[in-house]
């Protein structure tokens, strides 16, 4: 059974710092891995998607990497801003393009001005 | 990208009653899903809403408790039946944007409180 774990559960950093969020999964047989952002009381916003054959994806100040063999992904946020404060969720899609996502518990990030 | 709306955005209901949540997408999509997010928890997949056929439920979820309809490629409903306080959660629908991107888009969620 696929399980997804995110560390740390919470993180507080001063504005301007670079930071790394970690995600691990137990079964390397995945279709893709996605990072989402969730603001309080809101739905999820897709940040990055990495296909199982890819190693990383970049969007602006965000860079996500994927190491399928070790069951790990990282989300790197450069030059953090207070507007980055949110919960970041990692999810893996089960094999076979089913669209079914297994989510981690999330990392709640606070960026202090 | 797909734009998704949900109704209602929140509700407070009495134990033993039922609530139907609507999910509307601005474009036709093949894959549509319903998730539950219990307080302080992450998201758990309830079911895949299949157009024109019965929904496919995940382990721990049953049709009698969470009946789902999907009459067309832009709309779905989830009913939470015979509610108890344990059903208090955020319910979210999601769609896969397109076969070429695999990116999933989520609705804003319905925050349900059961007294």
Image (cartoon, coloured by chain):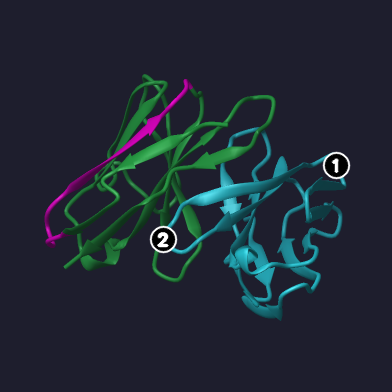
Q: Which chain is cyan?
A: A
Please tell me whether residue B27 belongs to the stretch shown in magenta: yes
Q: Quickly name the residue at label 1.
A: A54
Where residue B95 sits: x, y (%)?
A: 50, 35
Q: Which residues are magenta?
A: B13-28
Q: Earlier in the sequence, mark 1 or mark 2?
A: 2
Q: Quickly name the residue at label 2.
A: A41
Q: In the figure, B42 relative to A12: above or below?
A: above
Label 1: how many Cα within 10 Å (few below 14, some 14–19, many 20+): some
Front-most of B49 and A2? Answer: B49
For numbered disc 2, what is the local secondary structure? Answer: loop
Where residue A31 sits: x, y (%)?
A: 71, 40
Where residue B43 sits: x, y (%)?
A: 49, 57
Count the labels in the image. 2
Q: The residue marked by circle 2 belongs to what chain?
A: A
Residue B94 in the figure: left or right of residue B72: right
Q: Residue at x 48, y 55 (%)?
A: B44
Q: The residue marked by circle 1 belongs to what chain?
A: A
Q: Residue at x 85, y 39 (%)?
A: A53
Residue B18 in the figure: left or right of residue B27: left
Q: Residue at x 85, y 48 (%)?
A: A56
């Amino acid at each position: 059974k696929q399980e997804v774990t995110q560390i740390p559960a919470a993180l507080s950093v001063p504005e301007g710092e670079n930071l790394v969020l970690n995600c691990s999964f137990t079964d390397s047989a995945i279709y893709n891995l996605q990072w989402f952002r969730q603001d309080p009381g809101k739905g999820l916003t897709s940040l990055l998607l990495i296909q199982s054959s890819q190693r990383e994806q970049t969007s602006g100040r965000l860079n996500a990497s994927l190491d399928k063999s070790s069951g790990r992904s990282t989300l790197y946020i450069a030059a953090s801003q207070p507007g980055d404060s949110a919960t970041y969720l990692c999810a893996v899609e089960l094999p076979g393009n089913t669209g079914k996502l297994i989510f981690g518990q999330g990392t709640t990030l606070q960026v202090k001005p | 990208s797909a734009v998704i709306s949900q109704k209602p955005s929140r509700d407070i209901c009495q134990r033993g009653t039922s609530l139907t949540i609507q999910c509307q997408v601005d474009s036709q999509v093949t894959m549509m899903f319903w998730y539950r997010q219990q307080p302080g928890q992450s998201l758990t997949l309830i079911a895949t809403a299949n157009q024109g056929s019965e929904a496919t439920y995940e382990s721990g979820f049953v049709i009698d408790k969470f009946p789902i309809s999907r009459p067309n490629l832009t709309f779905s409903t989830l009913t939470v039946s015979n509610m108890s306080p344990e059903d208090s959660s955020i319910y979210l629908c999601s769609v896969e944007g397109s076969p070429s991107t695999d990116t999933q888009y989520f609705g804003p969620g319905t925050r349900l409180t059961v007294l």
